Image (cartoon, rainbow, N blue to C red):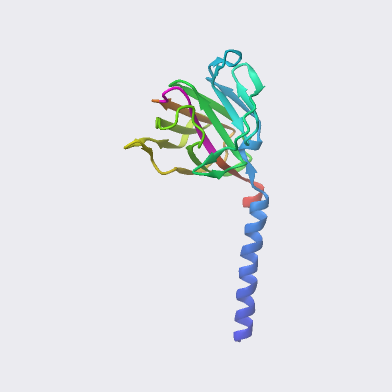
Amino acid sequence: MRIIISTLAIFVFLAVIVTDIAQAANVVYLSDLPFKASGLKGNPNGGYYDGIRVNSHETIITSSGSQSNQWERPTGIGGQAYPKSVLFHVVKDESVTATWALNRGFTKLTAMIGLDDTQDIPGIYPLITVDFIGDGKKLGSASIQSVYGKPDPTPSVDLNVSGVNSLVVEITFKGTGGGTNLDIVNPELQPVSSSQ
């Protein structure tokens, strides 16, 4: 009887591990999907621009399209590099958005949000609000505020995106001081097929 119970417990344990590995293998990163940016301002040719950097790539998406900026530093928060990421670079206080077509293909989005280790003016800690909007409905938000000159702990999000056709990430910056880089790192989407 003990052998049967032990064998059954081992099978259950292995089934859980195999399921977790299978689900991890089916993860899709939001940063790997195409998106449409809006609200980006500036003149990239004149040296002033807002931009979006994807997966630590040197190419930055700006209001005039994509351009190579020789940005060799990896996207990172607190000394940790994140290869899967979306970095929003904003020079002034404003709001920018990025819109992804999810086509009702995912059930969950998880990510971590924080100030990038690289800032135009170190020591400036703005108020930043990140809103996640699915088909016009607010799904969740995160914010970073100054606390005695230091940023709050890095927030994370765990959002239900079941049935969402269009996902908008809207980021509002205040008190940037001349240039701020905000990261959304490890933005994992759980596909519908892997959760069934």
* One can see residue 77 in this view: yes
Which sits in the foreground, 165 or 75?
75
Which residue: 59% across, 33% down? Answer: 165
Which sits in the foreground, 16 or 127?
127
Q: Is residue 93 magenta?
A: no
Which residue: 47% across, 44% down? Answer: 156
Q: Quadrant of residue 12?
A: bottom right
Residue farthest bottom in this picture: 1
27 vs 97, left or right, is: right
Residue farthest left in this picture: 148
Q: For the image shown, how many numbered marks are present on the structure?
A: 0
Query: For the magenta stretch, what is the residue range?
Result: 176-184
Residue 196: percent from the left, percent from the top?
Answer: 63, 52
Which sits in the foreground, 16 or 47?
47
Residue 116: percent from the left, percent from the top?
Answer: 50, 36
Eyeballing the image, is 61 above or below 17?
A: above
Residue 57: percent from the left, percent from the top?
Answer: 65, 33
Which residue: 65% across, 34% down? Answer: 33
